[in-house]
Amino acid sequence: MRKIALLTSGGDAPGMNACIRAVVLTALHYNIEVYGYQHGYHGLIGQEYRRLRAKDVLNIIQRGGTILRSARCHEFKTEEGAQTAAKNLNALGIEALLVIGGDGSFRGAQHLSNYWDGQIIGLPGTIDNDIAGTDATIGYYTAIETAMDSIDKVRDTADAFERIFLVEVMGRHAGFIGLNAAVASAADQVLLPELFKDSENTVTDILAHIEGVKARRGDSSYIIVVTENLWPGGVTGLAEELNSRSGIECRPVILGHVQRGGSPVAQDRLLATRLGAHAVEIARSGATGIMVGEHHHQVVTVPFAQTWAERKALDPYLITIMESLFDLLQRP
Ligand code: ADP
């Protein structure tokens, strides 16, 4: 194998740079040239690339974002878009393309495989952890840390004023960040898409829980973690609803894109390094159409289609613990 290419696509995540570094250094170890495409699939269509050498990945393991930049590209979804990308890869003599991104990027990789004969390998990079076949995705651990830190800070001010806060965390349509950040920050309540039933009962249950907790603890702060895209109108809408039903004043806080940034925590750097190195190893063995992931601390490979075929489940044991803790909060 002589030449590979690499790109980052879709939502960026802390640890993408650590992954780029591992890919480049492992490939150089085998005397393979690495070409980095800028701006995801957009750069693939525009033939926007540069050769990546060891000096290009110096001091990037600790940096958030991605030195290759990321983008979303509608044109790539079309037949013509993918054909142009295939033509460009062939013109450069690329034998394998490594894609760091989320499930959308993997669908894109699958789409490209209909028009390009080279090998395509995916690396899971997203804070949401919503990719089946890998226990964690690159960026997920850092996002939990950031959300937890932020909730701790909200708790300080909430405590000072004995207020109720609703904190919206990211996750797209999955509750991984919400569940873990809520447990790690000892939130008083959490709303996750996986456990959500209906709005009416949810409001009633929350109000009863607040009453129960108040009766037990007296006036104190109360924090509800809510996954984005769950409540119509977001946490602002939910705060208004709780307020209109009970007169209780609630403050909404949307954490937003801070969760996508920052220096990756050690777990993300290590995951990114292991997966990046392994992706080059399996590219050399001729593999294609697969994602490299980690399961039970072992590196695994998973066909692209399996990464989005099923919804990855939250840890049921952590849910049980969380629910019994919430219950304890309100018991006399
Ligand atoms: P993520 O990888 O974070 O899930 P997106 O869903 O935005 O991010 O996908 C990133 C890019 O992958 C899109 O902008 C598009 O170029 C490509 N893509 C996504 N879904 C498809 C699809 N079904 N077919 C072809 N390309 C796709």
Image (tube, grey):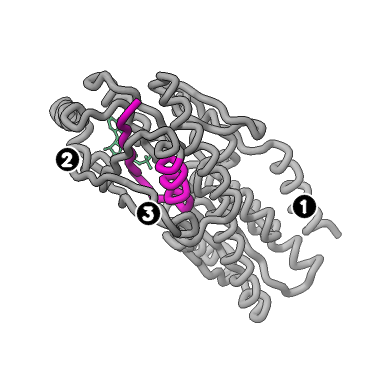
20 sits left or right of 221 in the view:
left
In this rendered view, identify the residue nearer to me: 151 or 42: 42
Which residue is disc 2 drawn over?
47
Figure quarter occupied by ligand 1: top left
- Label 3 is placed on what type of residue? Lys
Figure quadrant of the N terminus: top left
Helix or strand or loop: what does disc 3 sit on? helix
- Label 1 is placed on what type of residue? Leu
Question: How far across and how far down the image is residue 311, in percent?
Answer: 52, 30
303 versus 200 height, above or below? above
Tag 2: Cα neighbours inside 10 Å, few (<14), some, or many (≥20)? some
In this rendered view, identify the residue nearer to me: 260 or 198: 260
Give me the C-alpha separation between circle 1 and circle 3. 50 Å
Figure quadrant of the C terminus: bottom right
Query: Which of marks 3 and 1 precedes in the sequence?
Result: 3
Is 3 covered by the magenta stretch?
yes
Give me the C-alpha separation between circle 2 and circle 1. 54 Å
Query: Which of marks 3 and 2 precedes in the sequence?
Result: 2
Q: Which residue lies furthest to the right in this view?
A: 332
Give me the C-alpha separation between circle 2 and circle 3. 22 Å
Which residue is disc 1 drawn over?
325
Question: How far across and how far down the image is residue 212, in percent?
Answer: 75, 60
Query: Looking at the image, which residue is at 77% across and 52% down?
Result: 325
Of marks 2 and 3, the one in the foreground? 3
- Label 2 is placed on what type of residue? Gln
Q: Magenta span covers which residues?
A: 1-25
